[in-house]
Amino acid sequence: GNVLGFKVDFENTLPQKELKEKYLPEYFKRLNPKISKDELKYKIDHMSSEDMDDAVQPTVYDNNEDQVKAVVDNIIKYWPQRSHNYKYNALLTTHVGGNRASTPMAMMYYREFKRRNKELDRPLKVAVTFSADKTNGNNMLENNRSLHEAIDDYNKMFHTNYDTSSDKFQNYYKDVSLRMKNKELDLLIVVNMFLTGFDAKPLNTL
Protein backbone atom coordinates (compact mmCIF):
# COMPACT_ATOMS: atom_id res chain seq x y z
CA GLY A 1 0.00 0.00 0.00
CA ASN A 2 3.02 2.32 -0.07
CA VAL A 3 3.54 2.44 -3.83
CA LEU A 4 2.21 5.43 -5.74
CA GLY A 5 0.47 4.85 -9.05
CA PHE A 6 1.95 5.91 -12.36
CA LYS A 7 0.46 8.54 -14.64
CA VAL A 8 1.57 7.39 -18.08
CA ASP A 9 2.14 10.01 -20.78
CA PHE A 10 2.65 8.26 -24.11
CA GLU A 11 4.65 10.32 -26.60
CA ASN A 12 4.88 9.43 -30.30
CA THR A 13 8.09 10.53 -31.98
CA LEU A 14 7.05 9.16 -35.38
CA PRO A 15 3.96 10.54 -37.11
CA GLN A 16 1.01 8.11 -37.04
CA LYS A 17 0.70 8.40 -40.82
CA GLU A 18 4.30 7.22 -41.29
CA LEU A 19 3.82 4.36 -38.85
CA LYS A 20 0.65 3.15 -40.56
CA GLU A 21 1.77 3.56 -44.16
CA LYS A 22 5.41 2.49 -43.97
CA TYR A 23 6.72 0.81 -40.85
CA LEU A 24 3.76 -1.32 -39.75
CA PRO A 25 3.12 -2.85 -43.20
CA GLU A 26 6.83 -3.73 -43.40
CA TYR A 27 6.66 -5.26 -39.92
CA PHE A 28 3.59 -7.45 -40.57
CA LYS A 29 4.84 -8.54 -44.00
CA ARG A 30 8.05 -9.78 -42.41
CA LEU A 31 6.00 -11.78 -39.91
CA ASN A 32 3.62 -13.12 -42.56
CA PRO A 33 4.69 -12.63 -46.20
CA LYS A 34 1.30 -13.96 -47.40
CA ILE A 35 -0.84 -11.50 -45.45
CA SER A 36 -3.59 -9.92 -47.57
CA LYS A 37 -4.17 -6.18 -47.93
CA ASP A 38 -7.47 -6.48 -46.07
CA GLU A 39 -5.91 -8.39 -43.17
CA LEU A 40 -3.08 -5.89 -43.03
CA LYS A 41 -5.45 -2.91 -42.96
CA TYR A 42 -7.61 -4.54 -40.26
CA LYS A 43 -4.62 -5.28 -38.02
CA ILE A 44 -3.23 -1.76 -38.31
CA ASP A 45 -6.61 -0.05 -37.87
CA HIS A 46 -7.22 -1.94 -34.61
CA MET A 47 -3.88 -1.22 -32.92
CA SER A 48 -3.35 1.25 -30.09
CA SER A 49 -0.56 3.84 -30.29
CA GLU A 50 1.41 1.87 -27.69
CA ASP A 51 1.08 -1.37 -29.69
CA MET A 52 2.20 0.40 -32.85
CA ASP A 53 5.34 1.72 -31.20
CA ASP A 54 6.10 -1.64 -29.57
CA ALA A 55 5.80 -3.42 -32.93
CA VAL A 56 8.28 -1.23 -34.78
CA GLN A 57 10.60 -0.42 -31.89
CA PRO A 58 13.48 -2.88 -32.54
CA THR A 59 13.87 -1.92 -36.20
CA VAL A 60 12.97 1.78 -36.11
CA TYR A 61 13.80 3.25 -32.71
CA ASP A 62 16.77 1.34 -31.36
CA ASN A 63 20.15 3.06 -31.85
CA ASN A 64 18.41 5.65 -34.01
CA GLU A 65 19.99 9.11 -33.68
CA ASP A 66 16.85 10.90 -34.92
CA GLN A 67 14.79 9.12 -32.26
CA VAL A 68 17.28 10.08 -29.55
CA LYS A 69 17.20 13.72 -30.64
CA ALA A 70 13.39 13.71 -30.68
CA VAL A 71 13.21 12.29 -27.14
CA VAL A 72 15.80 14.74 -25.79
CA ASP A 73 13.98 17.63 -27.49
CA ASN A 74 10.75 16.55 -25.79
CA ILE A 75 12.35 16.22 -22.37
CA ILE A 76 14.03 19.63 -22.59
CA LYS A 77 10.92 21.34 -23.96
CA TYR A 78 8.69 20.15 -21.13
CA TRP A 79 11.30 20.03 -18.35
CA PRO A 80 10.17 23.19 -16.46
CA GLN A 81 6.56 21.93 -16.52
CA ARG A 82 7.25 18.30 -15.57
CA SER A 83 9.81 19.18 -12.91
CA HIS A 84 7.56 21.89 -11.44
CA ASN A 85 10.14 24.53 -12.29
CA TYR A 86 13.17 22.39 -11.39
CA LYS A 87 11.75 21.22 -8.06
CA TYR A 88 11.79 17.51 -9.05
CA ASN A 89 14.15 15.25 -10.97
CA ALA A 90 13.79 12.21 -13.24
CA LEU A 91 15.15 8.86 -14.40
CA LEU A 92 15.56 7.92 -18.07
CA THR A 93 15.92 4.18 -18.63
CA THR A 94 17.07 2.64 -21.91
CA HIS A 95 16.39 -0.78 -23.37
CA VAL A 96 16.45 -2.58 -26.72
CA GLY A 97 13.97 -5.06 -28.18
CA GLY A 98 11.78 -5.79 -25.19
CA ASN A 99 13.80 -6.10 -21.98
CA ARG A 100 17.39 -6.25 -23.28
CA ALA A 101 19.38 -3.48 -21.66
CA SER A 102 21.22 -1.05 -23.89
CA THR A 103 24.38 0.65 -22.72
CA PRO A 104 25.07 2.15 -26.19
CA MET A 105 21.63 3.79 -26.21
CA ALA A 106 22.20 5.18 -22.71
CA MET A 107 25.37 6.83 -23.99
CA MET A 108 23.62 8.13 -27.12
CA TYR A 109 21.12 9.91 -24.87
CA TYR A 110 23.84 11.10 -22.50
CA ARG A 111 25.94 12.59 -25.31
CA GLU A 112 22.91 14.26 -26.87
CA PHE A 113 22.10 15.91 -23.52
CA LYS A 114 25.71 17.07 -23.29
CA ARG A 115 25.44 18.59 -26.76
CA ARG A 116 22.11 20.28 -26.05
CA ASN A 117 23.23 21.57 -22.66
CA LYS A 118 25.68 23.88 -24.46
CA GLU A 119 22.66 25.67 -25.99
CA LEU A 120 20.64 26.04 -22.77
CA ASP A 121 20.57 29.04 -20.44
CA ARG A 122 19.94 26.63 -17.58
CA PRO A 123 21.76 23.37 -18.47
CA LEU A 124 20.41 20.16 -16.96
CA LYS A 125 22.68 18.31 -14.55
CA VAL A 126 22.76 14.87 -16.18
CA ALA A 127 24.59 11.70 -15.13
CA VAL A 128 24.55 8.13 -16.41
CA THR A 129 25.28 4.87 -14.65
CA PHE A 130 25.52 1.23 -15.65
CA SER A 131 27.65 -1.72 -14.61
CA ALA A 132 31.16 -2.11 -15.97
CA ASP A 133 31.30 -4.92 -18.56
CA LYS A 134 33.32 -7.91 -17.38
CA THR A 135 32.97 -9.92 -20.60
CA ASN A 136 35.52 -9.90 -23.42
CA GLY A 137 35.54 -8.28 -26.81
CA ASN A 138 34.82 -4.95 -28.48
CA ASN A 139 31.52 -4.39 -26.64
CA MET A 140 33.30 -4.62 -23.28
CA LEU A 141 35.96 -2.11 -24.36
CA GLU A 142 33.39 0.35 -25.71
CA ASN A 143 31.10 0.03 -22.66
CA ASN A 144 33.95 0.57 -20.25
CA ARG A 145 35.28 3.54 -22.26
CA SER A 146 31.79 5.02 -22.12
CA LEU A 147 31.55 4.50 -18.38
CA HIS A 148 34.94 6.16 -17.92
CA GLU A 149 33.74 9.15 -19.99
CA ALA A 150 30.58 9.50 -17.90
CA ILE A 151 32.42 9.25 -14.58
CA ASP A 152 35.08 11.72 -15.75
CA ASP A 153 32.32 14.25 -16.58
CA TYR A 154 30.73 13.60 -13.19
CA ASN A 155 34.04 14.22 -11.43
CA LYS A 156 34.36 17.58 -13.17
CA MET A 157 30.78 18.55 -12.31
CA PHE A 158 31.01 17.69 -8.60
CA HIS A 159 34.80 17.86 -7.98
CA THR A 160 34.94 14.16 -7.05
CA ASN A 161 37.52 11.48 -7.85
CA TYR A 162 35.72 8.30 -8.93
CA ASP A 163 36.76 5.83 -11.63
CA THR A 164 35.77 2.43 -13.05
CA SER A 165 37.77 0.34 -10.57
CA SER A 166 35.57 -1.90 -8.45
CA ASP A 167 35.75 0.01 -5.14
CA LYS A 168 35.58 3.49 -6.62
CA PHE A 169 32.73 2.58 -8.96
CA GLN A 170 30.65 1.37 -6.02
CA ASN A 171 31.32 4.73 -4.34
CA TYR A 172 30.33 6.51 -7.57
CA TYR A 173 27.09 4.54 -7.64
CA LYS A 174 26.34 5.47 -4.01
CA ASP A 175 27.21 9.13 -4.64
CA VAL A 176 24.89 9.28 -7.66
CA SER A 177 22.10 7.83 -5.55
CA LEU A 178 22.69 10.37 -2.80
CA ARG A 179 22.78 13.32 -5.21
CA MET A 180 19.49 12.19 -6.77
CA LYS A 181 17.93 12.11 -3.30
CA ASN A 182 19.36 15.55 -2.51
CA LYS A 183 18.17 16.99 -5.86
CA GLU A 184 21.71 17.80 -6.98
CA LEU A 185 21.06 15.97 -10.27
CA ASP A 186 18.22 16.79 -12.64
CA LEU A 187 18.28 13.63 -14.75
CA LEU A 188 19.88 10.23 -14.29
CA ILE A 189 20.16 7.89 -17.29
CA VAL A 190 20.20 4.27 -16.17
CA VAL A 191 20.55 0.76 -17.57
CA ASN A 192 18.90 -1.82 -15.29
CA MET A 193 19.50 0.27 -12.16
CA PHE A 194 17.34 2.17 -9.66
CA LEU A 195 14.14 0.87 -11.28
CA THR A 196 12.61 -0.63 -8.13
CA GLY A 197 12.73 0.41 -4.50
CA PHE A 198 14.38 3.76 -5.25
CA ASP A 199 13.45 6.19 -2.50
CA ALA A 200 14.52 9.57 -3.92
CA LYS A 201 11.67 11.83 -2.83
CA PRO A 202 12.39 14.58 -5.41
CA LEU A 203 12.06 12.04 -8.25
CA ASN A 204 8.68 12.34 -9.96
CA THR A 205 9.25 11.10 -13.53
CA LEU A 206 10.52 7.89 -15.08
Image (spheres, rainbow, N blue to C red):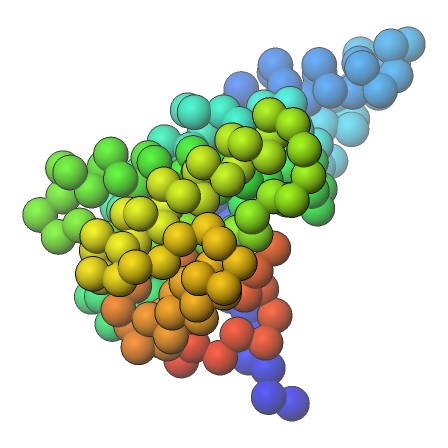
For the point 54% across and 32% down, which residue is it?
A: 141
- Viewed as shown, does residue 143 lie left or right of 116? right
Count of all numbered marks drawn on residues in the image? 0
Q: Height in image: 184 above or below 66?
A: below
For the point 61% across and 14% down, which residue is it?
A: 22
Q: Position of residue 198 (x, y in %)?
A: 52, 74
- Viewed as shown, does residue 90 lie left or right of 12? left
- Viewed as shown, does residue 117 lie left or right of 101? left
Q: Position of residue 179 (x, y in %)?
A: 33, 71
Quadrant housing the N terminus: bottom right
In the picture as drawn, the residue positioned furthest to the left comes out as: 121
Near-viewer residue (124 or 103): 103
Q: Is residue 38 visible?
A: no
Instruction: Please tell me in which quadrant of the rendered image residue 111 appears.
Output: top left
Q: Height in image: 179 above or below 164?
A: below
Q: Is residue 198 visible?
A: yes
In the picture as drawn, the residue positioned furthest to the right comes out as: 34
- Viewed as shown, does residue 163 lie left or right of 193? left
Q: Height in image: 185 above or below 78?
A: below
For the point 60% across and 25% down, which residue is it?
A: 138
Q: Position of residue 76 (x, y in %)?
A: 27, 46
For the point 61% across and 55% down, which residue is it?
A: 192
